[in-house]
Amino acid sequence: MSIQIGAYQLKSQVFLAPMAGTSDKPFRAICRAQGAALTTSEMVVIQKHLLGTNKSKHRLDFSGEPAPISIQIAGSQADELAYSAQQALKFGADIIDINMGCPAKKVCNKAAGSALMQDEALVKSILNAVVSAVDIPVTLKMRTGWNVSNKNAPTIAKIAEEAGIQMLSVHGRTREDKYTGMAEYDTIKAVKSQVGIPVIANGDITSAKKAQSVLQYTGADGVMVGRATQGNPWIIHEIDHYLKTGQKATDIPLNVKKQTILDHIKQIHAFYGEKLGTQLSRKHIFWYATHLDEKNAQTFWEKVNKITDHKLQYQLLENYLHQL
């Protein structure tokens, strides 16, 4: 089963979800190496007054990344998102993804992210504006709706298809659910039955078997993995292998995992610089330690969390991994 977006024939059915604070350039590279079909950037608001900021500089660095490069934009007005989309082209976008999935208060209070789903007329004008502003494929990430009584994803899916959106990713929770409770897939199934464009199922994809059962149940074209990749990017390879062969992937040897972790932390230090890189590495170190060694992870992390020197941080991690 292959997915086509514009001129791009994707090589797998497994996508990395755009996650603020996680799916940055170093992490995207790792997930791409594990077989992710598409790794979308963290959401970015590309407005003139923000372009000089450190955050934008790092979020908009795609140098050396293989195509297709998918940049996720956020905003609350049609003209603002159309402008962001045109700017994203200058940073190398091959695909523009519109964020209507983020439940964060600071995003939703500005009526951006999943808050937009409350206003279907506004959604329509945004999608039309962005699609006509650029000549590359535009995709949309959304939730099942605003709350349990307002699951309007199927309606928005129709609006999106008519506007020329080329792929939909649907997280099986409402805005009100945030990340709590269980994701549900009935709404994703309903979305898939409404449209002819590819639909990607997102939410609680935590294993290869789960991925396959969600695909079978919803009829979706692919799965998008988010929080399950934190500390375990190898899950992408496991899912990809299972979907392609029907067989469980051979376990990745521990020494290979250790090397990936060390390379990742090195890349974070190099990409962000030593000070910021050391701070941003901490959560990844915690996630990796929890994945490999749940019993002792907390103790180790408490030690490493206080370190401000990148060399010492790397050294402690190397010693820790060596003992496993």
Image: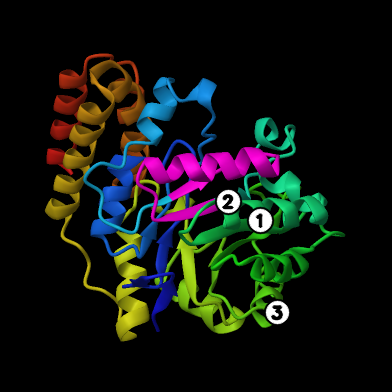
Q: Tell me if I can see residue 23 in this picture.
A: no
Residue at the (34%, 85%) spot, across then down:
246
Question: Marks 3 and 2: in contact by CB < 8 Å?
Answer: no
33 vs 229, nearest the viewer = 33
Question: Magenta part of the protein: which range?
Answer: 71-97
Residue at the (70%, 33%) spot, across then down:
105
Query: Where residue 25 sits: x, y (%)?
Result: 32, 41
As measured in the structure, the alpha-carbon distance from the residue carrying label 3 to the one carrying label 1 is 18 Å
Question: What amino acid type should be assigned to the residue bearing mark 2?
Answer: Ile
From the image, tell me which residue sits under label 3.
Answer: 194
From the image, tell me which residue sits under label 1.
Answer: 127
**Is 253 colored magenta in this rendering?**
no
Q: Is residue 17 left or right of residue 266?
A: right
Residue at the (60%, 81%) spot, across then down:
196
Q: Is residue 255 left or right of residue 179?
A: left
Query: Where residue 281 sits: x, y (%)?
Result: 31, 30
Task: Tell me if residue 84 comes above or below residue 217 in the rendering.
Answer: above
Question: Marks 2 and 1: in contact by CB < 8 Å?
Answer: yes
Query: Where residue 53 sits: x, y (%)?
Result: 44, 20
Between disc 1 and disc 2, whose residue precedes?
A: 2
Question: What amino acid type should be assigned to the residue bearing mark 3?
Answer: Gln
* The quadrant where residue 306 appears: top left
Between disc 3 and disc 1, whose residue precedes?
A: 1
Give the SS element for disc 1: helix
- Callout count: 3
Q: Is residue 292 left or right of residue 43?
A: left
Q: Nearer the viewer, mark 1 or mark 2?
A: 1
Q: Which mark is residue 98?
A: 2
